[in-house]
Image (spheres, grey):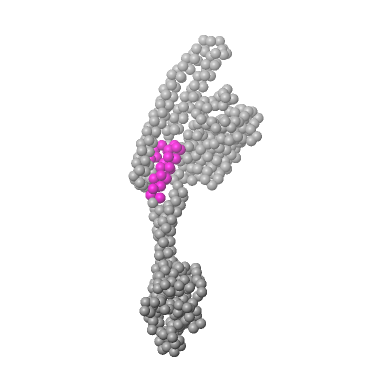
Amino acid sequence: MRTRLLPLLIVLMAGVLLALGFPLAASLAASEQQRVVVDRLDDAARFAALAQFVSESSPGTDERQATLGGELASYHDVYGIRAGIFYRNNRAMAAAPEDWVVPYAGEGRRAFNEALLGRRSHDPPQVWPWQRDARLSIASPVVRDGDVVAVVVTDSPTGQLRSRILRGWLLIFAGEAAAMLLAVGAAFRLTGWVLRPVRVLDAVTHDIATGRMNSRVAATGGPPELRRLARSFNEMADNVEDALEQQRAFVADASHQLRNPLAALLLRIELLALELPEGNEEIASVRTEGRRLAQVLDDLLDLALAEHAAAELRLTDVGALSAERVASWRPVAEDKGVTLTGECGAVTAWADPVALSSALDAVIDNALKFTPAGEEVTVTVVPDRSTVAVVVADQGPGLTDEELGRVGDRFWRSGRHQNVKGSGLGLSIARVLLTAGGGGVSFAPNEPHGLRVTVTVPRHAPAERDPGQGFTER
């Protein structure tokens, strides 16, 4: 969730910084240029004051004109700025360099024409750092007796101006980059603070879904709404756990209480059978149904105990345990004419040995039930990086895709196998036993026919729950 929320916050913060940065950069460029314009206007005003007293009647002989020409030449030599005073008819009163004339087009001509109207240049076009050939033209009128008799024009290079603007922009960029890094750091902390309770809630939900019903959320961090959600979740989990506990207790008590009456009933049936002819079909049917009912009650009690008991995980040699179960079931397989083989290399994993043995017994028993004589059942231990899988593959009739979706449900049996002995709880008990230890069981078709059941247990030790990390256990 953080990977989806962070880009949104970062884009919003970047938009805000850009919205502030562009106007600030434009304002800096305008401010730097305005400083240059004011400086050039001051210079132009000084030259205009000198040019007021230059006589136009005898050009080249006026001492003031010579002084003005010297000032312009010195100004050009020192600053590299072209400057000149031009009469209304474009003739030069004085200019530096001497061959410089009023431009006939462009910004220089616009400034000259504006000054002829008695206005000084005040708003030349903005110069940007990427305009390498840009120049700054400033004009100021020379007024004598209320009339504009000439115009002072300066034409400045903009290299230093563009450099100052660029340096200012780099400072703005550095400041915005630092602000962006600070904002990203704040966004990480903020999203972590907001989403941490959500991650904890998700982990505890997964724990409860996989059988750790005593897991709870420590409502100590995050926004008030999420703390309130954590408390509500804990209340809900308490109610669900209580309801499941009552259900398990009822099943266990009912199974236990029914066993004694059923045992007495079966005993009476046996006594009644002594009074009937040998081989009576009705009494044989009653015996069969009685034993089946007794098996169902035993399986119900086992299921209730499996759901209630906590897994005692320890490092277990899954290969040796699987080989032991194969050896225990081999006489049953031989009695049915089925070949039971095992490829059980030495590999360790974290499991409850009793629970894993019971689960393997249920899976192997189920495979032997449905495998016809002359066929084979294989048990293979397959390790990978995170789990160890025990694959039990039979060559029985197998299941359809629809049946594969329901296999493992309580009391479910395929309609094609109703005549096979069993209660429909064996695989359910196996799934409960494995889930309690962090493992699982899955079902898939076996080629060319049959069913492949995969029992998995984790290879790594279960993570310790730290209450400081947001988990509590009752």
Q: Is residue 292 above or below residue 458?
A: above
> In terms of secondary structure, what is the magenta stretch mainly?
helix
Task: Please identify the quarter of the rendering in which residue 83 is found.
Answer: bottom left
- Residue at image coords 51%, 82%: 99
The residue lying toward the viewer, choosing from 231 and 348, is 231
Residue 326 belongs to magenta span: no
Q: Is residue 352 above or below residue 192?
A: above
Q: Position of residue 164 (x, y in %)?
A: 43, 71
* Residue 441 seen in render: yes
Residue 210 belongs to magenta span: yes
Side (left or right) of 42 relative to 406: left
Q: Position of residue 181 (x, y in %)?
A: 42, 59
* Residue 367 seen in render: no
- Residue at image coords 41%, 31%: 244
Task: Please identify the quarter of the rendering in which residue 217 is found.
Answer: top left
- Residue at image coords 43%, 77%: 151
Quadrant for the C terminus, please: top left
- Residue at image coords 44%, 49%: 5
Q: Across the whole image, how many numbered discs are drawn on residues? A: 0
The residue lying toward the viewer, choosing from 165 and 386, is 165
Q: Which residues are magenta?
A: 191-216
Side (left or right) of 299 relative to 217: right
Q: Position of residue 215 (x, y in %)?
A: 39, 40
The residue lying toward the viewer, choosing from 380 and 188, is 188
Q: Is residue 71 above or below residue 192?
A: below
Q: Is residue 73 above or below residue 258?
A: below
Q: Position of residue 40 (x, y in %)?
A: 41, 75
